[in-house]
Amino acid sequence: MSTVDYTRELSVLEGKPPLRELDDLISKPLETKPNRKFFIALSITLSMTALLVIGLGLTFYYGIGMWGNNIPVGWAWDITNFVFWIGIGHAGTLISAILFLFRQKWRTGIARFAEGMTIFAVMTAGLFPLIHVGRPWLAGYLFPYPSQNSIWVNFTSPLLWDVFAVSTYLTVSLIFWYVGLIPDLATLREKTTNKIKKIIYSVTSLGWRFSNRHWQHYEMVYLILAGFATPLVLSVHTIVSFDFAVSVIPGWHSTIFPPYFVAGAVFSGFAMVQNVLIIVRKIFNYEHIITVDTLEKMNKVMLLTGSMVGYAYAMEFFIAWYGGVEAERFTFLNRALGPYAWAYWIMVTCNVVSPQLFWIKKIRRSIKTMFVIAIFVNIGMWFERFVIIVSSLSRDFLPSSWHHYTPTYVDGMILIGSFGFFFTWILLFAKALPVVSMAEVKAVVEGSQPSHKDH
Amino acid sequence: MNNKILYSYTGIFDSPDDITHAAKEAVKQGYTKFDVNTPYPLHGMNKAMNLSPSKLGYIALIFGLSAALGTLLSLWWVSAIDYPIVIGGKPLFSFPAYVPVMFEVTVLTASIATVLAMLFIFFKLPNNAHPLHGTDYMKKVSSDKYGISIQADDPKFNEEKIIEFLQSVNAKEINTLYWNNEEINHENKILDPKFLAFLILVAVVTSGVTYFSLNKLMFMVPFNWMDEQPKQSAQQKSIFFVDGFGMRQPVAGTIARGYIPYQFKGQPDLAGEKLVNPIPVSKESLQIGQTKYDTYCSPCHGYHAESDSRLHGQFPNPPSLHSDKVRNWNDGRIFAVITEGQNIMPSYSTQLTVDERWAVINYLRVLQRALNAKESDLK
């Protein structure tokens, strides 16, 4: 570890703020009473969440028939939303684990927030398979346990792999996040003057003492967790893509799916992280912690993954033609020219064309334009999942069973509500916990590490 | 002050270079029970404090490997031993399909085990009763200062020498830390009324919620397993049909799938002329015939068709099937009797399928031949 050159210039922080000022700045939202703007934002997200609750209530009471799903379109917005949200989560793990392994220092300013987003996105995503089964209170049957029915789940099914992948992902992300929070909670414990807060922070920080005998193990565990989380994050979206690729539906049965899905997940996740961070840095005055340099690097990742996604779209078409399977050829022509062509072209415009603007440095560094492009990317990535799922299912092998899918108002309520659910958690998180890791940011401030001039 | 127990001497430093230097010097002086507290991990401190590399990697390795192996074994047991079921024509033990689950369980187990081992075994946390807690020293090192704390239980502990040492490495503030007597003498009060009241509350709430969910909630819509459905059940009144009956007659002329009407109703002699036994005499057909004969025919006709009824006269005995009349009947004529019945013998068409009736006839021929064997049968 000590072979890395820590003296080189870093773009994590602008200037060289005193460490105590960093503490004050990062913990300020926690120590001040929430203002009017916060309550307005919270009331909006809570109203959206109320739509989710009503939509789910209607679904549970009257049944899945409240949705637009109908055979052969058994998967529609529910699974679209699931894949979309789980993809959003992937950026957090990529930033916290993969960039950590690559020693990318610029990740420190945004890692905590991105990890938080991972957890909330996976929580939101987890709702959808549950409600999709129709009776979510029986979801315990998904886990293999020796029951009186004396039967077991099907271990060869990708849907079962999904249960393991998503629950493992949520658990490991939570652990990773909490381990990162411990030193910060201890800092807050020492900082606070409020009695109740002191008790909460004492309990949650477990009595962390900033001992270097502990830091040594702590860093090792962080490395191990990053080492586990990296293949884990790749496996999660790979397994999500298996839900499609292992079936025989034209347009799904494709070996390009795992890398294509992972790239798409990182793409949409970075777009969402970037959008939310731009708002956070503005509201909390973190402009010199979450710098334009950091955002520019995120835009570069989006440019890369966006191009990979564009390549995958092109390759799918090529293979459909080159493979010579009639049904595949029809599926892809139908995607581009059929009843859902509008969705397909929204997807191509948002995902392939718009990120290409990031080749221009001015656009890459302009807050306003990058914000708009990232919103486009989010829209495009939602439509990508919609196109894959609905256009393939509505036109399967048997023309007699073709069916045009139209969403209902309950579908709409659940989609809007899922955003409300996600952003409610984000708002509460931003007010309750330090959204930037104090310990990690301090460690990369200029002059915060021994200079090795030696004595 | 005298009744307080000394924990350590502490020194505060302003720069990472100074604390690294101090840690190196402390090791040189031979101190072993000392600690360096910094707001973030300092690179090179492991070396300066002469710490051996963390062994947590082994925990991850051991738990990870055991989880991988354990998962593989349990998947094998579940799919190939306990509940073997062929899915998609794959072998019962299909290793490639187990890789995703094995991987996820490995990562989950190893991550949880490593973190728990670090927090609870390596760090002995949670511990909020350490002498360093609630001190000015901790306030400083948690934010922007770097501190060293040399403990009183160090074998080389000597107050004057330690102060001298801390001064020699340019420590800014040199302080003493004491054990907190309250914390040392603290006892957990399990029988505290407040705690007992809390336990009772938890018990009441838990049992109440469990009772409600299992006995009430599971019988409410929509949790009641679709007990109430707006569909027509048998014997129910219908509001759709004019006559009000929920159960309907089949459309006139409906016949069951595979049903072939019997053409010789009331014409047994014609049946004897026209019908030909389609079932060849074979070991299998004779065995089926025997089973069916023994089940349906033998109670009256006897196991050997001698009319030795097992019904003890409660039902009139039929005539022997070894009579010349029956022996000379064609198979079709017997088929007509089984299908339609004769005298007080009822029809057996619902008990025996067409093929089974022919098989029974084949078996009956065997029984007849056994009592009236020909010379040629002896050869």
Image (tube, rainbow, N blue to C red):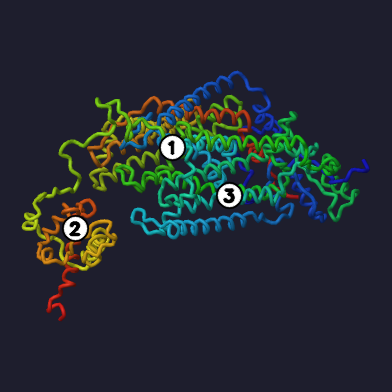
Residue designated by label 2: B357
Q: At 63% across and 43% down in the image, what residue appears? A: A179
- Do tag 2 and tag 1 residues touch (Cβ < 8 Å)? no
Image quadrant in which you'd find residue A293? top right
Circle 3: residue type: Ser
Q: Is residue A8 visible?
A: yes
* Cα separation between marks 2 and 3: 69 Å
Report helix, strand or loop for mark 1.
loop
Q: Earlier in the sequence, mark 2 or mark 1?
A: 1
Does dot 2 land on a helix, a strand or a loop?
helix
Pinpoint residue B39: horizontal percent, then vertical percent. Answer: 71, 40
> Which is nearer the N-term, disc 2 or disc 3?
3
Q: Which residue is mark 3?
A: B111
- Tell me which chain the residue with mark 3 is part of: B
Rounded to the nearest angstrom, the CA distance separating label 2 from label 1 is 45 Å
Within 10 angstroms of label 2, few (less than 14), some, or many (20 or more) residues?
many
Chain under numbered label 2: B
> Is B146 or A411 nearer to us in this picture?
A411
Label 3 CA crowd tier, 10 Å (few <14, some 14–19, many 20+): many
A17 sits to left or right of A153 = right
User: Are labels 2 and 1 assigned to the same chain?
Assistant: yes
Q: Give percent across and percent down for residue A120.
A: 53, 35
Earlier-in-chain disc, 3 versus 1: 3
- Amino acid type, mark 1: Trp
